[in-house]
Image: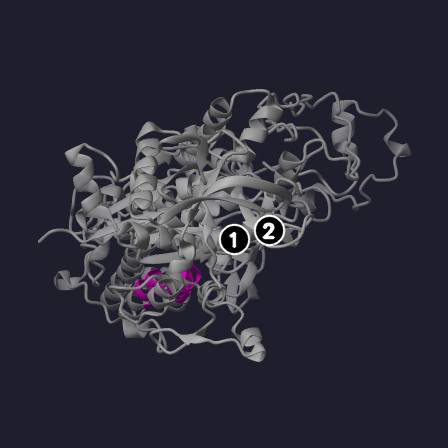
Amino acid sequence: MPKKKFYLTTPIYYVNARPHIGHAYSTIAADVIARRHRLLGDDTFFLTGTDEHGQKVERSAAAAGIPPLQFADQVSATFRALWDRMGITYDDYIRTTEPRHTEAVQRLFQLLLDRDKIYLSSYTGQYSIGEEMFVDGPPGTIGPDGKPTETVTEENYFFRLSQYQLPLIDLIESEDPENRLLIQPESSRNEVLSFLRGNVAEASERGDVLELSALGKPYLPGALKDLSISRTSFKWGITVPGNEKHVIYVWLDALANYMTAIGYGSDDPAEQEKFKRYWPADLHLVGKEITRFHCVYWPAFLLAAGIPTPKSVVANGWLLFDDSKMSKSKGNVVRTETILDAFGTEVYKKQFPDSTKKEQDLFAADVLRYFLLREIPFGQDGSFSFDAMITRYNADLANGYGNLVSRTLSMIRQYFSAGETEGRPGGDSLIPLLENNNSSFELNEISDQFSFPEAVLEIVTKCFSTYDFGKSLESSWSLIAVMDLFISDQAPWKLAKAGTSESATRLRQVLYAAAESIRIVTALLYPILPFSTAKVWAQLGLGDIEQAAKNGELNNLEWGGLKPGTKFGALAPIFPRADKGLAQIMIDMENPNSTSEKPEQPKPSKLVDETTTHTSPAPSDPTDPAAAPRTSSLPEGAPGMTVAGSYAISTERPGTPSHTEARASGVFANSAARSDIPDTPQIVIDDFVKVDLRVAQIVVAERIPKADKLLRLEVDLGYEKRQILSGIAEWYTPEELVGKKIVVIANLAPRKMRGLESHGMLLAASHGDDGKPVLATFAEDIPVGSRLK
């Protein structure tokens, strides 16, 4: 049986400036949809590219002092390089300056001319340079881009758009899914229909004659006017065949890319077959500001040419920064590269120093993908801020999904290592074997209100069909939360300690349920988090998730797919926690020359290597002449910044060293003159020897539900294992703690917190009232249980 085809496109991005996060938003959504359809087994074709003609590009190139094609080459290259850096899986990248496109657009124009859908005339009107369109109004009218229009008189070719008022209304209103143009969200659909129908209310008051569409909805005949589709006032465009003083209107040129990229207008039989295979497009993803072009002009061109119209157009909203739409002219854009550089270097590279630049970029791209699709309802405007992204990352990815994976796989590794399970050889951990190899654990024990996996799969499937990414992720995260609560309720560490056959069976059931839940939720999250889910999939011992997607394994999510006895891959953290200071780093990267007030920076002591942040000179890139200088590299230890891996600028004045540190370093000679010497009381040696300080190794670390600051740790003291609760969850993720050798007070009286007993205390250093605690560890190997003296 032939595969079902699915052809989707992004808007092709205009090359008047380099890409920002708003461009990435549409492209990320398209990539998620493409990955989803591929894993469903559909023959998927994903197109993106750049729109490179028009008066705006011609003027920008002239201002930069270079030819338009060179200008377009440079800007288009930045878009393509960014999509490659982010791991975007497009199948083709079309440029409107390519010969395949130019020739096909001329053929489309000639076809419309031959069918008498185009005529030559002249026109005087108000032209918006920014939007490349004529607008109604007197001289000086403000155009859609917020700038005054220019009065333009031209001989133009006109498209008989007025003939398609009723056909377009009927096409959009149709209830036949095979013969309609579906526009989402509903607000965009209503906006387009309102434009097509004209001002019905005002016409009715005037007594004008209204007519009815096929569904009986009124419209004002003649409200849709013919459209100018050529220009003679500039030269940068595709020339009209047979009349080269005209260039083809940039929107007819640009919109045709959706067909020219898949073979329209080609003489090559293979390209012709490709067009026959993939057209019409199943989905055009667009920004809401260009909905009219895609839902009025584009289908009208196709109807006139006798070519099938696309099946659906989905408009995403704007990303708002500082409460307004991101715009280069407003100076409030956020570059995607800033997020890739910051999260890749400040979060991922610190956890994995040997990681490649590609791995760092793909990790950071996952963070951005998750935030945009989880935080902003697709189709609506949404606010973006660095603080919100870091908060969402820590709460959902580090503390949620990453923590569930870490605690589950760590416990399986601890309790069911190879050689202890059914006598299997080897040194790797295995998924626990159930009695009689039975994996059908009764999941209704997990939650009385949560049916799994059927409910989750149903919700995710429905949400993807309506592009409700936020609700899909919310459903997946509800499963993660339920499994976290389930593990805490079942307390596998207690089952392991009980030592009975019943507790051993229950331990296998609980940990298998958790691991199988991780498998299913990982498969569901793959389209949105391709890099991170690949790491989890490999840790589960399931191999390459990309290959699994191609094989259809991610589409088969029945319970029991994780075979007992499966050997784990190497375990490692998935989402290292991000320091809150990362927001300031990204702000500074976006505005390196900002004159806004910044906190006073301390001067480095002679004991600290002086490291400066190097800033590149003003850019010579002609494609973005107004761009501010960008940070070329991040410091590896900038003085005056917080310790323990954060490069965030401190919001407080620098502290002074303790008297012990000061004497040791020679910073000052007269310590008695200092007012900040600790006034702690002296103790005698007998007091000190009462404190039993021991070397301990953390074997289990996990979060405690509804306790944001507490972690539950199990530590090995050599002579026994014990539970310790520690308030370090704000600074350490569970996965980075497992395996660490630390110092604990072993003879501290037990204390109960959150219903759990803590038998000991960790030792850590910190600086300032809100300083990050840094655990006391060891530079040399030492056996657990050793006493500090």
Residue hosting label 1: 289
Q: Residues within 10 Å of mark 2 (few under 14, many from 20)?
A: some
512 horizontally vs 234: left or right: left
Q: Which mark is residue 144?
A: 2
Residue type at the position of mark 2 = Pro
Q: Earlier in the sequence, mark 2 or mark 1?
A: 2
In this view, the residue in front, 747 or 26, is 26
Viewer-proximal residue, 95 or 240? 240
Left-right relation of 657 to 590: right
Quadrant of the frame with the N terminus: bottom left
Question: Which amino acid, mark 1?
Answer: Glu
Please say whether residue 480 is visible from this viewpoint: no
Label the magenta part by its dominant secondary structure. Answer: helix
Q: In the orientation shown, which residue stands out farthest toward the front? A: 121
- Give residue 189's quadrant in the image: bottom left
Give the quarter of the image for residue 162.
Answer: bottom left
In this view, the residue farthest toward the right is: 673
Can residue 157 be seen at all in this image of the molecule?
yes
Across and down, in percent, residue 702 comes to 45, 55
Report the span colored magenta. 459-483
Expressed as whole percent of the image width and height from the top left, the position of residue 131 reads 55, 45
Q: Is 36 a magenta residue?
A: no
Instruction: Provide residue 487's location: percent of width, then percent of height.
Output: 38, 64
Residue 200: which disc? none
Mark 1 residue element: helix
Tell which of 66 and 772 is nearer to you. 66
